[in-house]
Image: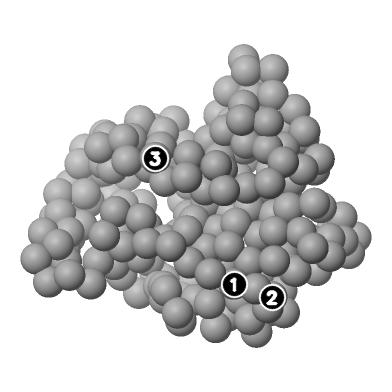
Amino acid sequence: MELQDKKHIGSLFDRIAAHYDGLNHLLSLGVDRCWRREAVRKMKPVDHVLDVAVGTGDLALLMCRKHKAQRVTGIDLSTEMMRVGAQKAQRAQAPIVFEQVNAQQMPYADASFDAVTCAYGVRNFADLDEGLSEMYRVLKQGGELTILEFGYPEAALVRWGYTVYFNHLLPFVGRLFSHDKTAYTYLNQSVRQFIYGEDFLTHLRQAGFQTVSFRKQTFGISYLYRAVK
């Protein structure tokens, strides 16, 4: 799948949904759990959260478990990812509703949600600015946007090791366990070609957010962005 053609992103994630959680934890050596915990720890407790690109629901479940959200509406284009997430939410008796919705064309009214979150999904938007503008639109005044997204380490030695891992080991292991030849190659390409740090903050400001910040996680492999409407 080419990066410029993201209209089939839902079907790509449908194909790997059954293996997604296990591979995420394996390929990150479990550090992805720490990244989500830090994001949720910094959130204020609110009533209704919109979780964009909810996937299999890890962030949504954590928000409920840590009492940062009384209820969560999770949206995604992948029905299979959400099916896995709905099963997890049912087992945990978590108040999460899963809906197949395009993040760039949300059916929700202005100022519908107390907070908006997105974990490792914004780089998959066909149009980043449209997606961020929609997040701004459906967020209540004073509400907080929390985004987790991959970056690329800047320290030379870490960057070299990460590049070797990301270009060779990750696609190989991803293909081996998911039996999909393209999904983890796409993951590699999408991360390498996406913006991060100050460049991403520029797009948040263009969407209307004024109070914006980021924090590097694990040498800049992941970034935690926070913005307030």
Q: Name the residue under label 3.
A: 34
Residue 4 in sight here: yes
Q: What residue type is labelled 2?
A: Phe
Q: Mark 2 points at which residue?
A: 209
* C-alpha separation, residue under disc 2 versus residue under disc 3: 26 Å
Q: Residue 225 carries which label?
A: none
Q: Residue 213: image x %, image y %?
A: 53, 69
* C-alpha separation, residue under disc 1 versus residue under disc 2: 7 Å
Q: Residue 87: image x %, image y %?
A: 61, 22
Give whichever of discs 2 and 3 has the lower sequence position. 3
Identified at 79% across, 63% down, the residue is 142
Q: Which residue lies furthest to the right in this view?
A: 109
Q: Name the residue under label 1.
A: 212
Can you say whether 216 is above or below 75 in the image? below
Q: Please indicate whether residue 215 sits to the left or right of residue 152 in the image.
A: right
Q: In terms of secondary structure, where does tag 2 sit?
A: loop
Question: Is disc 1 in contact with disc 2, using a CB cutoff of under 8 Å?
Answer: yes
Identified at 43% across, 62% down, the residue is 215
Q: How many labels does the image show?
A: 3
Q: In terms of secondary structure, where does tag 1 sit?
A: strand
Identified at 87% across, 55% down, the residue is 112
Can you say whether 4 is above or below 170 in the image? below
